[in-house]
Amino acid sequence: MGRCDTWDRHRSPARRGAIRAPSRTPSSGIVDGICEITLEARDAEALASFYDEILGCGRISREEERIWLSCGSHARLGIWALGKKEFGDRGGRHVHFALSCAPKSLDAFAGRLRRLGVAHRDPMEHPGGDRSIYVEDPEGNVVEVWDFFRQGEGARDGVEALGEAPRTGS
């Protein structure tokens, strides 16, 4: 398992020396989590199969141009066919997104990816003690599977750990 200094760019701008926004506790705003993420796909069925078979996101439903998958107990992942949707939604490129995972599950997940022949970066440890695996889906989206809220700083401090400057000592 290697350290993830180069991939640590996904941490907050404050961790990279930017000006820090005022601290907010998770309960101080209206948003308390992510309900859904949607991805566009040239082949929606192939992409849905990747998330279902590789990441275990079970299928919830299928509509004409959409497939919905579970993403934990409080979120869903939408795989949408290309094209304009009813709210003017349109696809775009993003850097990556992260999915939360159970504590101590990354090594078993890495083994599963190896057995299935899926290219990935083995678990990488970040400076705060949390770990991630990175894998590309069939559409080229970088998916991070991250134990941040279950290990290290994230387990201790929650989302506040992402907004703080690096600690120099305890």
Image: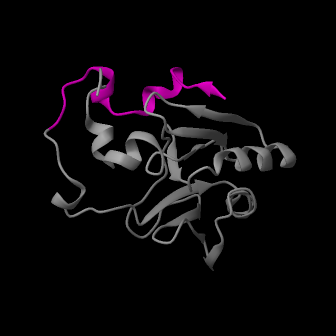
Between 135 and 139, the one nearer to me in the picture: 135
What residue is rendered at 55% in x and 31% in y? 125
Between 21 and 62, the one nearer to me in the picture: 21
Percent coordinates x, y for residue 98 in the rendering: 51, 47
Q: Is residue 91 left or right of residue 113?
A: left
Percent coordinates x, y for residue 22 in the rendering: 13, 39
What residue occupies the far left of the structure in this picture? 22
Q: Which quarter of the figure is the N terminus placed in?
A: top right
What residue occupies the far front of the structure in this picture? 170
Q: Is residue 90 left or right of residue 138?
A: left
Relative to 139, residue 169 above or below: above
Percent coordinates x, y for residue 77 in the rendering: 54, 64
Magenta stretch encompasses residue 109:
no
Judge whether residue 63 can be spotted in this image.
no
Magenta stretch encompasses residue 20:
yes
**Magenta stretch in the rendered image:** 1-21
